[in-house]
Amino acid sequence: MATSDNIRKLEELIKSQGAEEVNALKEALEEINEERAEEKKKHCKDLLKKALDLQSQMNTAERQFNQAKKKFDKELGKILGKLRGMEQGKSAEEVEEEAKAAEANEKKETPAE
């Protein structure tokens, strides 16, 4: 990469300075680099916080989805049980009574959540 005229002039300026001026320029450059490093660190930290927040939100959403899915699956199972009963020739009343009895037994066996 070719050195621009301004960069060459900057290098000449640094070379022409006395020891104190060179040290001051070096210190200023070090401070600038430290400031940039701090800005980069802060930006990375902000991005990591956002990533962790999103991960937490995703976990919460997934947990809620799985709970809802479980409830829907349970209801679907109840409906399929009723349909099987009707397929076996039972009346709608018999099917409903069996479903209520099964639900009552399930409540007795399953502790409250």
Image (cartoon, helix red, strand yellow):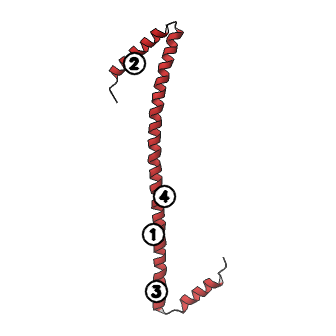
- Give the mark nearest the N terminus, 2 or 3: 3
Marks 1/2 in contact by CB < 8 Å: the verdict is no
Where residue 79 sits in the image (x, y, percent)?
A: 50, 19
Q: CA distance from mark 1 to mark 2?
A: 62 Å
Q: Nearer the viewer, mark 3 or mark 4?
A: 4
Amino acid on which disc 1 is placed: Glu
Label at residue 103: 2
Where residue 26 sits in the image (x, y, percent)?
A: 48, 83
Marks 4/2 in contact by CB < 8 Å: the verdict is no
Q: Image point 47% across, 44% down: which residue?
A: 58
Q: CA distance from mark 1 to mark 3?
A: 21 Å
Marks 1/3 in contact by CB < 8 Å: the verdict is no
- Give the mark nearest the N terminus, 1 or 3: 3
Amino acid on which disc 4 is placed: Leu
Decide which of 41, 107 is in the foreground and name it. Answer: 107
Q: CA distance from mark 3 to mark 4?
A: 35 Å
* Crowd band around label 1 with a 10 angstrom C-alpha radius: few (<14), some (14–19), many (20+): few
- Give the mark nearest the N terminus, 4 or 2: 4
Q: Image point 47% across, 91% down: which residue?
A: 19
> Up-down: is 9 above or below 75?
below
Give the labeled residue for mark 1.
38
Q: Image point 61% across, 87% down: which residue?
A: 9
Name the quadrant of the C terminus: top left
Label at residue 24: 3
